[in-house]
Amino acid sequence: MNENKLTPSIRFKNNDGESYPEWDFVKVKEIASINTGNKDTKDAVENGQYDFYVRSPIVHKIDSFSYDGEAILTVGDGVGVGKVFHYVNGKFDFHQRVYKISDFKDYYGLLFYYYFQKNFLKEAQKYNAKTSVDSVRKSMIADMYVPKIEMSEQIKIGNFFSKLDRQIELEEEKLELLEQQKRGYMQKIFSQELIFKDENGNSYPKWKSKKIKELFNVIDGDRGKNYPSEKDFYDKGHTLFLDTGNVTKNGFLFNRNRFIDKEKDDMLRKGKLELNDFVITSRGTLGNIGFYGQNIHHKYPNIRINSAMLILRPLNNKFNNQYLYFLLKNDAIDTFMKHYRVGSAQPHITKKDFGNMKISVIIDINEQRKIAKFLTIIDKLVINQSTKVELLKQRKQGLLQKMFI
C-alpha cells in the first residue's frame, strides 16, 4: 500500500550511518498468527506455575501452559480493549477472550508490541461505527496494518523502547520504596512509636483525643436544585468546580479543570473554599486530601467542591497547617473510612460520621512543627520521584508519537 508510506519524524540510522528506507505497511495476518485461548478466569490457581493472562492488566497464575514462545496478548472485549497489552516470551496460558499474536515472520515482536500499543484503538475504530471500541474480532486484528521495516531498524526501535520501559520500571520501584518509607514513618509517628523531644531532650505534653468536628468545621457541598449540570461547565470561567480527579493521594491536581460562571456560583449556598481549607474526598475514592494554601489560592481564587467531597475548615490557629495535612493522611483516617463507609458500588462516608471520628492530636505547636518539617522532607522526595516517573512516561509517549505517527 504505497499510498500509506510513512517517514517518522525521528529515525535511527543503519550501521553505516545512512538512513533507512521509508516505511511501507503490511497486514498483521501476513506477518503473524492470531489465536484466542481456551481458559476462563475461574481456571486461575493462586500459586500456579505459569503466568495466566485474562482480560485485565493483572497477571494471574495457572498450572498449565498452552504456548511457549514470544507473543503479544491483547483483550478481545470489555473495558480493557485497546488498553491492556502484554509482551511475553516463555510458557504461559491465556483467556478465551484474549488474543495471542505470535509466530512472527520477519518481524520483531517488541516492535509489534510498541506499535500496537500506540495505534491499536485507531485501527480498531476503522471497523467500528461507535465512538468507543468495546470489542474486537479476530478478522479485525488480522486486517490491521503495521509498518514494514528492515529487521535491523525493527530491532533498534524495539530495544530502544524496551530499555525506556525498564528505566520507568526502576524509577517506579524507587518511588514505591519511598512511599513505603513515608508510610512507615507516618505509622510510627502517629502511633507514638517514634517520639520527638524538645530542645532540652524533654518529652512534649501528652497527646489528646479529639473529634474531627472539634478541630474543623466540616462542610459539605451544595446539593440543591442549583447544583451545576453538564451544560453549566466551561473550560475557563469564574469559579473552579472541583472534580474527584482534582483531589489525589498526593494533593490537588489541576490538569483537567471545569469552571462555572459567576452567576451560577452566586446561586450556590455552600461548598466554597477559603484560604487554608482542607478538602477530603468522601465518595468513591475515599480519603484523598488537598490543602488550599496561598499558592493555589493565588492561581484559583474561587473554588467550590462537588458533592463527593467535604471541606475541613480549621476552627482555630492552634495547629500547624502542614501538621494537620499529615494528620489527615495517617492510617487512622484510612481505617475509619473503611470501617464506616456506606454502600458498595459507590462507597461514601457521611459528614456526621466523619465529624464524630476521634483522633489523637498533638497539643504543643513546636512538636507539631517538628513532625511537619520531618514528614515534609520525605513527602518532597516522594513527589519529586513521582514527577520523575511521570516525566519519563510522558517522554515515552512523545517518542511513540513521533516514531509511530
Image (cartoon, grey):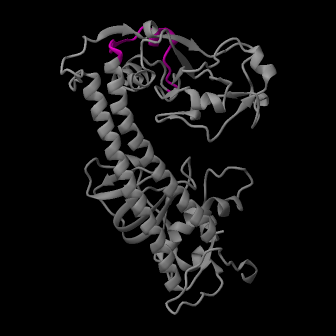
**Quadrant showing the C terminus:** bottom right
Give the percent coordinates (x, y) of residue 301. Answer: 67, 26
Q: Is residue 105 above or below residue 96?
A: below
In front of the other: 58 or 364: 364
Farthest residue to the left: give it: 201
Give the percent coordinates (x, y) of residue 103. Answer: 46, 77
Observer able to see residue 55: no
**Quadrant showing the N terminus:** bottom right
In front of the other: 89 or 12: 12
Give the percent coordinates (x, y) of residue 75. Answer: 52, 56
Observer able to see residue 160: yes
Which residue is pictured at 48% across the width and 9% down the height?
316
Which residue is pictured at 34% across the width and 58% down the height?
51
Is residue 355 shown in magenta? Answer: yes
- In the picture, residue 188 is in which quadrant? top left
Boundaries of the magenta span? 345-365
Farthest residue to the bottom: give it: 16
Q: Is residue 35 left or right of residue 369?
A: right
Which residue is pictured at 52% across the width and 67% down the height?
114
Give the percent coordinates (x, y) of residue 290. Answer: 52, 28
Farthest residue to the front: give it: 200
Is residue 139 shown in magenta? Answer: no
- In the picture, residue 190 is in which quadrant? top left
Q: Is residue 110 left or right of residue 253?
A: left
Which residue is pictured at 65% across the width and 52% down the height?
133
- In the picture, residue 233 is in which quadrant? top right
The number of numbered badges drawn on the structure is 0
Q: Is residue 130 above or below residue 196?
A: below
In front of the other: 332 or 223: 332
